[in-house]
Each structure stands twice: as C-alpha cells, then as structure tokens.
Amino acid sequence: MFHESYDNGIEEDWDNKKETKYHKGVPTRNVNYPEYIKEINELKNIYKDRISIKTGLEFGIQSHTISQYEELLKVAKNYKNYSVLGHLDLVARYDVGNGKTPLKFNQIKPIITEILKTVIEDGKGIELNTSYHRYGLSDSTPSYDILKLYHQLGGKIITIGSDSHKPDHLGAYIEESKDYLKKIGFTEYCTFDQMKPLYHKL
C-alpha cells in the first residue's frame, strides 16, 4: 500500500534506500530485487504525471585513512559502468566521529587529483551530497577543496543528492547547494536518464 506524502517541490527522484544486511561481517544482497523493481514500476505508474521516478543503485567501499582513496582510485580506473562517484570523502565524517584527526587536503590532493582526472576522462561525474548539513560537518561532502579542484580540472558533470533516509530529508538543502556550486564556479548541475547526464542551469 502506498501513502500520499507532502509536496516539497521534488519532480524527480531515483533513490529508494534499503538497509544493507550482513552475515558474519559480510554484506549480503540487501533487497529482493524482483520485488524492488515491481514496487518501483507500480510507483512510476501511480505518479507518472507528477514525478519522474528512476531506478538506481548505490554501491561502494568503506575503509579508513588514505587507503580508502587508494582503493577508490583502483575502482575508478577499473570499473566504468557508473554515472557518478558519490561520497568521495565520506571517510572524513567517520574519522571525526571516531576521534581521529582527518587528513589535511594537501595530504590527499595528489591521489584525489588522480581520481578526479580519471572521472573526467571517463565522462563520469561526482556528487555534492547535502547530508553534511544534518551531520553538522564544518565542510561540504565532498569538501570545498575537492569541489574546487574538480572544477579547476575541467569537471562539469556534478549532481546534487540529499541522501534521503527519511521523508523530511528528501530534497533538503538542494537550493542552497545550487548557490554553493555557483560560488565555486559551476554554471550547471546534472540529473540522469539511462545513465546519461542531463544538464540544468544553476
């Protein structure tokens, strides 16, 4: 059964977050995909004249310190069937939460540069994730320095995600993020259709 929700101006949505299940420390399939796709198709039919609902999958790696960036570079160099590299410096959030000292940008700049150059050369993009607001972080995710570097390297494909885990998270801080990207120098942001970027003026 589907329930109506309030109208917060969202006209396009693609993320239906599901909780990851673990068995003996190993992540297992976190959703019944036939049922998942069936539910999405039913929602598409119900809201076809009101909202564009798309199917997507978030997957990734989690570790700590600079090894995370080294692993991410390997993934970017060897795996090409994606649209956007998200949560680029997510590790900083967990380092703060564990009482660790986050790496300074200059410490990771060389490897971040390699990652971003690979992303750009492959015609992929990155994500500005607005959840840093609700986590009370002092910098954006990814950081201002990373976003600025991406722009300086010629990166143009950038999307904005609210990382919604609750209804009131949906679309949170999207408009503020558009202004933030404009201040960095971006003139457009992207949504996606069939994994292809669609550009919109900021």
Image (spheres, rainbow, N blue to C red):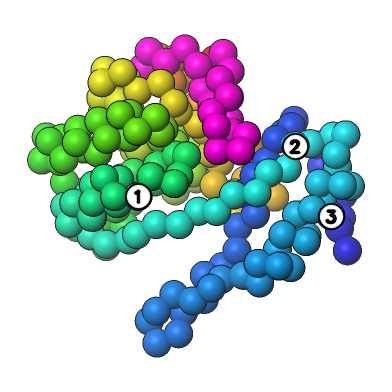
**Is residue 59 visible from the viewing direction of this image?**
yes
Q: Is residue 137 left or right of residue 72?
A: right
Residue that carries the numbered disc 3 in the rendered image: 42
Find out whether residue 198 is within the magenta segment: yes
Report crowding for label 3: few under 14, some 14 to 19, many 20 or more residues within 10 A (C-alpha).
Answer: few
- Mark 3: amino acid: Glu
Left or right: 196 as drawn, with respect to 114: right
Q: Residue at x 38, y 81 (%)?
A: 25
Classify 10 Å Cα crowding around label 1: few (below 14), some (14-19), many (20 and above): few
Residue annotated with mark 2:
52
Disc assigned to residue 79: 1
**Residue in the image at 73% along x and 42% along y:** 53
- Numbered mark located on residue 34 in the image: none
Q: What stretch is highlighted in magenta?
A: 184-201
Report crowding for label 2: few under 14, some 14 to 19, many 20 or more residues within 10 A (C-alpha): some
Residue found at x 44% / y 46%: 81
Question: What kind of residue is marked 2?
Answer: Ser
Q: As rendered, which of 118 and 89 lies closer to the eye?
A: 118
Element at label 1? loop
Picture quadrant where residue 155 is located: top left
